[in-house]
Amino acid sequence: MKSTLDGEFLIELIKHRIEEAGAMRESINLDTRDKSSRNALYWAIVYERIDAVKLFLEAGISLEVAPEMSALELARSVGNQTTLSLLGEEQVVALSA
């Protein structure tokens, strides 16, 4: 249960930082991570918080959501189709074919 609380807290923390920074997004730290080195985008993908995924991507959060794991890999592994679309999964598949 603690991971769920930690994940939700991290999502809300980063959302708050982005909202507070407004137009000065280049000055905020989006790379806060939990004790397992997962960032807020990781949790937003897992919990299918599409509003947060969009916000984090627009703000330029790291796509390395966990050690040696990209946002695209995570979205594939959990079957988050909306995030795959946001990340351009169709284009990635088309290029690799």
Image: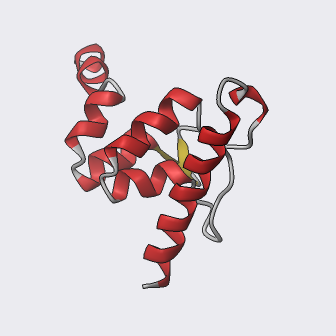
Q: How many marks?
A: 0
Q: Position of residue 14 (x, y in %)?
A: 60, 50
> Where residue 21 appears, x then y in whole percent?
69, 35
Q: Above or below — where is 80 with respect to 28? A: below
| Residue beneath the point at 74% across and 43% down | 29
> Is residue 32 placed above or below 35 in the rendered structure?
above
Coloring applied to the structure: secondary structure
Where, by quadrant of the figure, is residue 91 drawn? top left
Residue 53, horizontal then vertical, whole percent: 41, 41
Residue closest to the far bottom? 1
Q: Is residue 42 above or below residue 3?
A: above
Quadrant (top left, top right, bottom left, bottom right) of the N terminus: bottom left
Q: Position of residue 68 (x, y in %)?
A: 55, 50
81 horizontally vs 72: left or right: left
The residue lying at 51 percent from left, 56 percent from top is 11
Between 44 and 81, the one nearer to me in the picture? 44
Image quadrant occupied by the C terminus: top left
Q: Left or right? Give the position of 4 relative to 17.
A: left
- For the point 57% across and 30% down, the residue is 59
At a point 27% along the width and 55% down the height, the residue shown is: 78
